[in-house]
Image (cartoon, coloured by chain):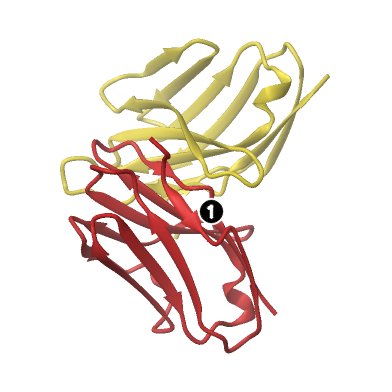
Chain colours: A yellow, B red
Amino acid sequence: DQQVKQNSPSLSVQEGRISILNCDYTNSMFDYFLWYKKYPAEGPTFLISISSIKDKNEDGRFTVFLNKSAKHLSLHIVPSQPGDSAVYFCAAIITGGGADGLTFGKGTHLIIQP
Amino acid sequence: DAGVIQSPRHEVTEMGQEVTLRCKPISGHDYLFWYRQTMMRGLELLIYFNNNVPIDDSGMPEDRFSAKMPNASFSNLKIQPSEPRDSAVYFCASSQTGELFFGEGSRLTVL
């Protein structure tokens, strides 16, 4: 049973526009969420995170929104740039109960078109 | 800091052979994780260690897989015997405060 779901395997967005990547989770115990970005032949790198006590976290062009009632989070990239083309993984964790590994979604391949 | 270092970057082997993947975590990090990435299942946690002790290996697919962390600066993941379905990219990650730092991965192809 997949606890973190990214239902869009790929997404194509024009340069300069907004990219919205979505993520749904089923475990209501998750209280911390992260987005990782992965280029080909490289390991995932941390991008942005949000605690369940917040509904929004912004860092430059990247904003993550959390809707706890819907068990849904999204990553917004504005404006999208060619260097944003990568695979984006959503991840979730239950903090305070030990350091269990993150539960990852399968990823969404974002393609920024010039 | 050099980051998490994994070797080999690429491994091609024949079914039945033993495969050993290696990881050097970031110095001072007390958690080490092994993940496997496949197209079908995305990133899966295989096992993680805290202070060199295995904490949760419930993600290890079967007895053919084993992982050790003999000291704070090294871990290995072994597959014996390897099978074609083990073909994937294996990532090692380390952490101290919760944020994971990943290595570049070891791409394994079992023929």
Q: Residue at x 65, y 35 (%)?
A: A86
Quadrant, the C terminus of chain B: bottom right
* In the image, farthest residue toward the right: A114
Q: Is residue B97 above or below residue B55?
A: above
- Give the quadrant of residue B77: bottom left
Q: Nearer the viewer, residue A72 or B26?
A: B26
Relative to A46, say whether B20 is above or below: below
Q: On the rendered structure, is A85 left or right of B17?
A: right
Q: Secondary structure at mark 1?
A: loop
Residue B72 visible in the snapshot: yes
Image location of residue B102, percent across then percent down: 44, 45
Q: Is residue B78 above or below residue A47?
A: below
Identified at 45% across, 47% down, the residue is A104
Quadrant of the rendered image containing residue B22? bottom left
Q: Is residue A100 visible?
A: no
- Residue B59: x and y in percent read 38, 67
Q: Position of residue A46 (x, y in %)?
A: 45, 32
Residue of label 1:
B105
| Mark 1 residue type | Gly
- Can you say which quadrant of the picture contains the N terminus of chain B? top left
